[in-house]
Amino acid sequence: MAKTRTVYICNTCGTESSQWFGKCPSCHVYGTLEEQILNGNANGNNRAGWQSQSNNNNRKPTTPQPRISVKFSDITEQEQPRMLSGYHELDRVLGGGIVPGSLVLIGGDPGIGKSTLLLQTANQLSLRFPRILYVSGEESGQQIKLRASRLGVGITKENDDNGEKEVFEPNLYILAETDLEEILRELESLKPQVAIIDSIQTLNYATLNSAPGSVSQVRECTSALMQVAKRENITLFIVGHVTKEGAIAGPRVLEHLVDTVLYFEGDRYASHRLLRSVKNRFGATHEIGIFEMVDHGLDEVSNPSELFLSSRDELAPGTATIVSCEGTRSLVVELQALVSPTSYTSPRRATTGVDYNRLQQILAVLEKRVGIPLSKLDAYVASAGGLAVEEPAADLGMAIAIVASFRDRMVDPRTVLIGEIGLGGQVRLVSQMELRLKEAAKLGFKRAIVPKGQTYSTDIGLEIVTVGKVIDAIVVAMPGNPMNISEEEENGG
């Protein structure tokens, strides 16, 4: 009889320990070690059976030959056509469509719309493929059908003698089950083209003594699903819960097992949702897809740049427009800044959608290199629409918005600002400049302020102004003595 042993597994990084610690010895997070009882295997580490007798001196040397490996040049190249999900934004994030036999992990906050997106995607796929399976461990079949009726999922309208009636799509199969072995048997029997697991934390592998959602359960269930998916060429969409820090719950190995990791983000008080890829073996990472939550579910946003631009007809001081790049997509975003005298001993700094540390750095550069006294002023910077802008190319627009608010000046709403600001006050080059300029020209902007030495096409249709330092950008963006410099100082007196 195999003996059992007790180990303690960290639910953050998956490290195993033979005894309990208050702090994980690997990731140094407190209170993450969970007790797991594992069934021993006497022959688990016995690998003497495959060991060769290469140490036998009586054997004659032979030419090395592969046993089951093949040469890379002998592998035939077979291009697999991708399956279109029915949503252009989802296909963009996946790299052009769904790869057959791949595993896609989708994480996000509760109520953000993960199940809604996947149920709508299953409906679109069921219109073109004969077998689509939706496995739910959180809802019963009646609850899924009730939600589907509200979203219009799986319903087609047909005419008969009694008039028009609603008919549910026959190609969409529902399985309300948490037992992993039952789900695996259903996958092998039905052989669907696409299967959705909602969610991986609810599945239970009976041979393990731990509770569903634990480190060992999530790891073993994902591994078993991966083996069936690769063997039967089934595409799996797996929903994963997230922790309070925003990371997908369970061991880190979960993200290593799957082919693609997507995060569904958004503010619960806003209507738009962002689908962002952080890992993709079949496409580019950091691509985003934009959806809007409406009364009948999620709709795609055809022109996302307009979503992150407020009304450009209403001029207001302290605003500047930038072009941010997320993967291969360019988004025009309006940055808003407010600078005011502080009422506290230490001035307040607050950001929404931009990096707090970048704001602190830009404030220091403006005070040291430009001479604007910001150390005793409150500073608030936000991106319109709440889009998270993390790249350094937004530095120049953030600096101009701060100066415009400080001087109560307005920047031309038809001007975009693109550039990174160095600690010496210089404007540095950024990547994908031509892609950014084309997006600005498409939306009707007339002028762009970019770093000096930047390469771009000359037939974009924008007036390009190059600057080498942030003070030069301030003068160009806000003409007419923006710094309130006296005429003698401006003439060098």
Image: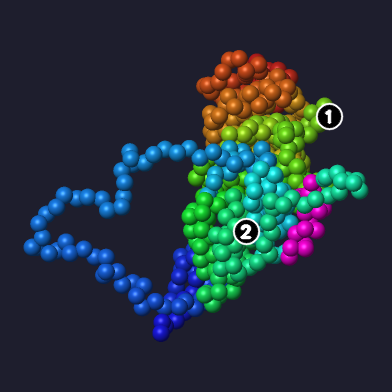
Residue 197's tag is 2
- The 10 Å Cα crowd at callout 2, few under 14, some 14 to 19, many 20 or more, is many
Does residue 395 appear left or right of residue 407 in this picture?
left
Identify which residue is drawn at 73% across, 65% down. 140
Can you tell which quarter of the image residue 218 is in?
A: bottom right
What's the magenta region? 140-156
Q: Main secondary structure of the magenta part?
A: helix
Residue 207's tag is none
Q: Amino acid at mark 2?
A: Ile
Q: In this picture, is 227 found above or below 475?
A: below
Does residue 40 appear left or right of residue 194 in this picture?
left
- x and y, in percent, of residue 464 in the image: 62, 18
Q: In this picture, is 308 found above or below 2?
A: above
Secondary element under disc 1, as helix, strand or loop, is loop
- x and y, in percent, of residue 413 in the image: 75, 26
Secondary element under disc 2, as helix, strand or loop, is strand
Q: Amino acid at mark 1?
A: Glu
- x and y, in percent, of residue 432 in the image: 55, 29
Can you tell which quarter of the image residue 246 is in?
A: bottom right
Q: Nearer the viewer, residue 77 or 17?
A: 77
